[in-house]
Image: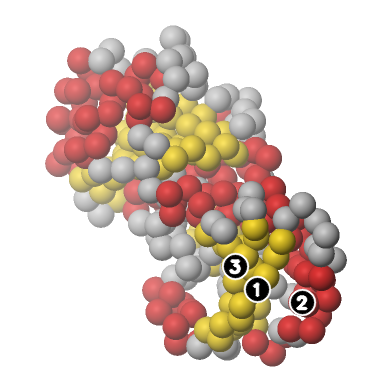
Amino acid sequence: MDYISVHIRIEPFSEDWAEIVEAEIADLGFDSFTVEEPFLNAFIPKDQFSEPNLKTVLSAFDGAEFRVSHTVELVKEQNWNAAWESDFEPVVVGGEVTIKAVYHKDLPRTRWNIVIDPQMSFGSGHHQTTTMMVEQLLEERRALKGKALLDMGCGTGILAITAAKLGAAVPVHAVDIDPRCCRSTVANARRNRVPHKIITVCGDASVLIRGQYDYILANINRNILLADMASYVRALKPQGGRIFLSGFYTADIPMLLEKAASLGLAEVARRSREDWALIVLQK
């Protein structure tokens, strides 16, 4: 299926105005949106697209506090989803969470469903470490309810969105050093109807505030985890805070546990899958 990509320029740009425009055009058949300042990008199957209808809806913003203009691009099937559909199958975790792309249709519904834009390749849920993180969230979901949580290195926001849907305290914080990942998380939070439950911050561990979180999730890589673990510990609440670490191999566990012990953390759980590992540490 060929798609039409509509690039709507919003001047001056704000996330709030992009959200307003998205809400107004959603009923025209658009099934996916991304935000790349100053554009709201909207995607629709070619055979469902009507530019006159789009122009009619956008004309309603004439005289508003912001201006909109648009361009239209044809996205051929092989560019839009052939590579993704060959490599991106829906991921079902624990029989309770499904992570899927916007183009996956008619799937059996699990209790929780996470929809990820197919253009966003910063985390699809397929990697073993992401799966293990979601499994651990599911295992601790009763303890998680009402608890302050941080998704560090959020990527597409899968973990932050899952935590928000599982009942973590609002707002869940999502942090990433890559602006594209931050935009991805914002867009996916909106797509999963939890934008009011997630705050996304672009930065590194230096943005963390002391004593703020009950849970910190960090699915990054060994070297960054070793470098930033002290910052994570400072950001935990004084008693009982937990850190989920993943993004490394089972062979890396001893050096991570050595660092954790030096910071007053004890291992309370671990998982492994195909040589990838996850450890849960507690203050």
Give the mark nearer the N terminus: 3 vs 1. 3
**Label 1 packing within 10 angstroms: few (<14), some (14-19), many (20+):** some
Where on the picture, by quarter, is residue 31?
A: bottom right
Dot 2: element: helix
**Quadrant occupied by the C terminus:** top left
For marks 3 and 1, give the CA distance: 9 Å
Tag 2 residue: 54
Q: Nearer the viewer, mark 3 or mark 1?
A: 1
> Which amino acid, by three-letter code, is at mark 3?
Asn
Residues at circles 2 and 3 in contact by the CB criterion of under 8 Å: no
Residue drawn where x is 81% and y is 64% of the image:
62
Q: Decide if residue 64 is on the left or right side of residue 12.
A: right
> Residue 16 location, x and y as percent?
69, 48
Q: Are marks 1 and 2 in contact (CB under 8 Å)?
A: yes
Spot occupied by residue 126 in the image (x, y as percentages of width and height): 40, 60
- Mark 1 or 2, which is nearer the eye? 1
In the image, 216 versus 55, the foreground residue is 55
| Residue 199 percent location from the top left of the image | 57, 37
User: What's the residue at 34%, 53% (across, down)?
Assistant: 128
Residue where numbered disc 3 is placed: 41
Name the amino acid, label 1: His
**Figure check: 280 above or below 86:** above
Image check: 76 left or right of 146?
Answer: left
Instruction: Report the residue marked by disc 1.
Output: 70
Instruction: Give coordinates of residue 65: x percent, y percent.
Output: 77, 52
Asked if residue 27 can be seen in this view, the reply is no
Say how many tags the image has.
3
Real-space Cα separation, disc 2 to disc 3, in angstroms: 13 Å
Compared with residue 264, is residue 87 higher up or lower down, i.e. above or below?
below
Secondary structure beneath dot 3 equals strand
Q: Mark 1 falls on what kind of element?
A: strand
| Residue drawn at (35%, 30%) of the image | 205
